[in-house]
Image (tube, rainbow, N blue to C red):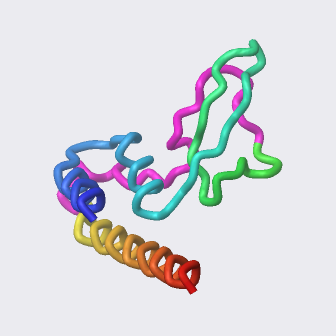
């Protein structure tokens, strides 16, 4: 739970677009998982990116060169956070709802595993 509290604090403190924060919101708030991208055209820059299910998106053409940021597919949650109208409360409620759903699913799986 402290991880969510920390994430909410970071959302509330955000003053401008932050792709690291966007990635953390997707990963820890919405349960996105890392997917591995192999080496690029030059044989370098293998990396991991976040996707909803931890698998690369079938048929999607990734760049042929360079490291791809882990937030490549993530929503740009913080793009408007410097705007006074940035919906901090809405983002916080979405994160809380997502975490509650994840915790309920984990609890159900743990209970089922103990039966």
Q: In this view, does 17 lie to the left or right of 67?
A: left
Q: In this view, does 42 lie above or below 46?
A: above
Q: In this view, does 112 lie above or below 30?
A: below
Quadrant, the N terminus:
bottom left
Q: Is residue 82 left or right of residue 33?
A: left
Q: Which of 84 and 48 is in front in this view?
A: 48
* Residue at left offset 55%, top offset 78%: 109
* Residue at left offset 47%, top offset 54%: 27
* Residue at left offset 82%, top offset 48%: 59
Q: Where in the figure is residue 107, as x and y percent of width and height?
A: 45, 79
Q: In which quarter of the image is residue 68?
A: top right
Q: In which quarter of the image is residue 25?
A: bottom left
Q: Where in the figure is residue 24, as x and y percent of width and height?
A: 40, 49
Which stretch did the figure color magenta?
A: 61-85
Overall secondary structure of the magenta section: loop
Q: Kindly give the residue lying farthest to the front in the view shown.
A: 115
Q: Which of 4 and 65 is in front in this view?
A: 4
Q: Is residue 50 above or below residue 26?
A: above
Q: Is residue 57 left or right of residue 53?
A: right
Q: Where in the figure is residue 46, as x and y percent of width and height?
A: 66, 25
């Amino acid at each position: 739970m402290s991880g969510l509290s920390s994430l909410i604090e970071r959302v509330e403190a955000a003053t401008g677009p932050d792709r690291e924060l966007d990635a953390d919101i997707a990963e820890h708030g919405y349960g996105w998982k890392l997917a591995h991208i192999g080496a690029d055209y030059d044989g370098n820059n293998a990396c991991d990116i976040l996707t909803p299910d931890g698998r690369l998106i079938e048929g999607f053409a990734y760049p042929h060169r360079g490291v791809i940021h882990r937030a490549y597919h993530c929503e740009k949650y913080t793009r408007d956070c410097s705007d006074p109208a940035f919906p901090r409360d809405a983002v916080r409620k979405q994160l809380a709802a997502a975490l509650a759903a994840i915790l309920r699913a984990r609890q159900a799986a743990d209970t089922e595993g103990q039966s």
